[in-house]
Amino acid sequence: MFVRQDSGVLSIGRLLLAGVISSASAGLAPAASLSWQPWQHLAGAFDVAGPRSDGELVAAGGSGLFLVSPNGTMTPFANGPNGYHGAAGAEAYLDVSPGLHVASAGCDFARDDIFILRTSAPLGITRVDASGHATNFANITGVDTLGGIIFDSAGRFDHRLLVTGPHNQHSTVLAIDCKAGIVPITRTAPTVEGGLAVAPLGFGTHGGELIAPDELSGAVWAIAPSGQATLLVQSSIAHGQDTGVESAGVVPAGFVARGGTAYVADRVTANNPHPGTDTILRMSASDLAAAGVLEGDVLIAAEGGGVTIRIHCASTCSAVSIVPTATTAHIEGHLAIVASHLGSRTTSLPAPAASTLAPVVNSNPQGAQTVLRAGLGILAALALLVLLALGVRRTRRR
């Protein structure tokens, strides 16, 4: 009888414990309401990259380049007579130099220089230095146009600038060094276009490879320095022209631990099911962490509606939807995912500078942490209750 009574106490305890664990797990699950939030208006917005060494992002819009501070102040950049004047409406994606050394060329890319695709003749790369002076960096032949650009921050491509472009129903991948020397990586890669990323070295067997989405098929490819292309994941996102996976970015070290912000451009596109808003969108590190995002993951957003997946690679690769609901957003260019430079974790996004631009819609749920703390408190009380019950039973038996 005593054993049955003890078992009953323990069974109740197990049930209560299961309920506590279940509640805590539910609180830590990805929030169904997770979404990209409007931040700052930028006419013709189509890419955002960086940050520069001063912490500012570089955004590209219909009227040129802008420096964007963490508080949202936007300053026109390189708009003088010797500045950058791109073709209106062109998807001239860009990347900001982190100041990498190219061993094979024996030189460095200057820190904070901006490299921009030139999609009109002659095709190539325009460089804008830190003072805003624009020059031709390299001409590129053998492709129909140019569709992607990213620096090899991991080093497996010798820290060169990687550029993609279509030709003969395939994609050409080129590696360009700091002296404008061009080396073809492959001319037979699958069709890819948009905001490229380079996976961190800890990204399973694909560490250091070029991550390239294909909006037409929904596939996400990993391209090695040898030129071999491997299907990383087949996204479950709707795919097709102006619809499928478009913008990639790597979650950097310190992003979850110290906080930070992810940014992407939402461009107005007429006569489209996803018409866009000409806005830089953003999402906080705390929101992404609550959705299970880890440092070293690759995030990819769809062009049509901003549906976003998280790709994690260890022994195998998997994709999980973290922003499941499409909106009217029309996503273009890179995902710029920036860790805070603060010593402690940032739990909220900085307020925007006073301006006439679109207001911030801030989201910073703390429900998961609250549920977990409550669950631990209940668990401690439950353990004490079980011990007291067992003590009472043993006393009565004596």
Image (cartoon, rainbow, N blue to C red):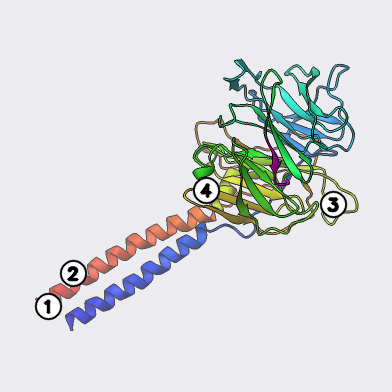
Q: Quadrant of residue 31?
A: bottom right
Q: Where is residue 7 in the image (x, y as percent from the top left)?
A: 25, 77
Principal secondary structure, stretch drawn in magenta: strand
Q: For mark 1, does the 10 Å Cα neighbourhood hold few (<14), some (14 to 19), or many (20 or more) residues?
A: few
Question: Label 4 to label 2, Cα distance in Å?
Answer: 50 Å
**Which quadrant holds the C terminus?**
bottom left
From the viewer's side, name the closer residue of 362 and 94. 94
Of mark 4 and mark 1, the one earlier in the sequence is 4
Disc assigned to residue 275: 3
Circles 4 and 1 in contact, beta carbons < 8 Å:
no
- Identified at 67% across, 20% down, the residue is 178
Circles 1 and 2 in contact, beta carbons < 8 Å:
no
Q: For mark 4, does the 10 Å Cα neighbourhood hold few (<14), some (14 to 19), or many (20 or more) residues?
A: some
Magenta segment boundaries in residue numbering:
186-191
Circles 2 and 3 in contact, beta carbons < 8 Å:
no
Of mark 4 and mark 2, the one earlier in the sequence is 4
Question: Label 1 to label 2, Cα distance in Å?
Answer: 10 Å
Disc assigned to residue 391: 2
Report whether residue 349 is seen: no
Which of label 3 and label 1 is nearer to you?
A: 3
Circles 3 and 4 in contact, beta carbons < 8 Å:
no
Report whether residue 368 is seen: yes
Which amino acid type corresponds to the residue marked 1 in the rendered image? Arg
Disc assigned to residue 397: 1
Which amino acid type corresponds to the residue marked 2 in the rendered image? Gly
